[in-house]
Image: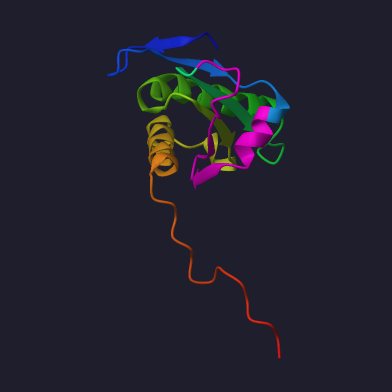
Amino acid sequence: MERLTVERPDHLPLIIDRLRVRRDFLSAAKARKWAVPGLVLQARQRRAHEAVPANHARVGFTVTKKVGKSHVRNRVKRRLRAIAAELLPQSGLKGYDYVLIGREGSITRPFPDLKADLLAALTKVHSSSPKSPSKGSGPRPAPM
């Protein structure tokens, strides 16, 4: 994917690069994530000491073998790359790494729905309020 440049309100362009190193994918996996019907989005804000310029966002794509054979996985990745190229320059944030994980429904999901899924996931991972714990979370009482 070529670098995409779009003027942002703060007059510094957001440049989208690719994640290619396994270590970066693993770091994103430990950060915030949100699952929607068409994909799973993992987003990690990079630390100041990392060697990537501050006005860059990076994106990586992965699809597991559960989704299908190689031609199906490649098609899912192409679809994810297309929506990322369209939406991340406007909705992505500088200094973030994003990983889009294709799901089984990604191949048959209509393209506008995939775009809506990514926008919803971006909104959730960038929301400042962390998810409230669910009713069943927390330590369990010791058995008697």
Placement of the C terminus among the 4 image quadrants:
bottom right
Residue drawn at x 37%, y 28% as measured from the top left: 91
Placement of the N terminus among the 4 image quadrants:
top right
Of residue 57 and residue 55, the one placed in the foreground of this image is 55
* Residue lying farthest to the left in this orientation: 9
Of residue 2 and residue 37, the one placed in the foreground of this image is 2
Q: Does residue 96 belong to the magenta stretch?
A: no
Q: Position of residue 138 (x, y in %)?
A: 57, 69
Q: Is residue 38 left or right of residue 49?
A: left
Q: Position of residue 12 (x, y in %)?
A: 36, 13
Q: Position of residue 101 (x, y in %)?
A: 59, 35
Residue drawn at x 57%, y 32% as measured from the top left: 99
Residue drawn at x 55%, y 24% as measured from the top left: 59
Stretch of the chain drawn in magenta: 24-53
Based on the displayed image, in which of its 4 quarters is residue 18 positioned? Answer: top right
The image's colour scheme reads rainbow
Q: Position of residue 65 (x, y in %)?
A: 72, 37
